[in-house]
Amino acid sequence: MSRESLLTDAVDHFARNGIGDASLRAIATAIGTSHRMLIYHFGSREGLLAEVVRTVEQQQRDLLASLTEGTVAEQAEEFWRRVTEAALIYGPLFFELAAHAMQDQPHTEALKADLINVWLPPLTDLCIRAGIAPDQAPAYARLGLAASRGLLFDLLLTGDRAGVDEASALLNRLFALPT
């Protein structure tokens, strides 16, 4: 099996079953390969999990790019709805690996580059489309990313979906205020 197909199978497996604390051998069995093949392609369980997070993050950026129907506010609402669904599955892993990246753990080297910087250009473009001045849009994009991640963290800790959704809607309204 190719690295890409193993990664796709792992993402699909985790989407159906959650991440949990499955060993590399258990993950390999579940996706129909050997733990040696996963070690060959990903180096370790942590390396595989980091690539799963990178893949899910890319899927979310692809989703953001694909939302073109409706107003920018409607697109933001749809994006939030779908990202929160993914966060309920992958969020704990995301935040765990983000902490590993902050500690410069080797298995997160590629992931570290993807956590912030690759999100800023598409979010900046979204801010500009929403009417934010181009010179202010990068700061708004960074604020929006940080606030959204904070709300996802809140959701995972409290389970308060209604409260988090309300705060996200408020954030969107604040972004719609004249700059």
Image (cartoon, rainbow, N blue to C red):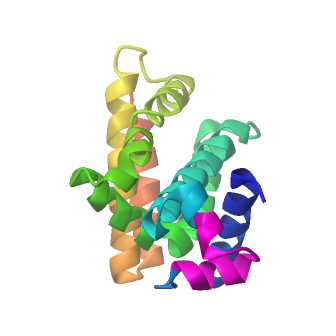
Up/down of 154 relative to 70, above or below: below
Residue 8, compared with residue 115, is above or below; it is: below
List the single residue furthest toward the left.
103
Q: Residue 51: horizontal and vertical position, in percent?
A: 54, 55
Residue 31 located within the stretch drawn in magenta: yes
Is residue 82 visible in this depiction of the protein?
yes
Residue 175: % across, % down: 41, 38
Give the answer, above or below, for where 14 lies relative to 144: below
Relative to residue 12, is residue 130 depicted above or below? above
Residue positioned most to the top: 135
Residue in the image at 69% along x and 83% along y? 29
Residue drawn at (54%, 57%) of the image: 42
Quarter of the image for residue 129 reads top right
- At which x and y percent is residue 126? 54, 31
Q: Quadrant of the C terminus?
A: top left
Front residue of this view, candidates 89 and 146: 89
Residue at image coords 64%, 54% = 78
Can residue 19 be seen here? The reply is no
Q: Which residue occupies the foreground of this view, 39 or 6?
A: 39
Range shown magenta: 24-38
Total numbered circles: 0
Magenta region, mostly helix, strand or loop? helix
Residue 42 lies in the magenta-colored region = no
The spot of residue 52 in percent (x, y) is 56, 60
In the image, what residue occupies the spot 41% across and 17% down? 133
In the image, taking residue 2 as reference, residue 81 lies left or right, namely: left
Q: Nearer the viewer, residue 176 or 36?
A: 36
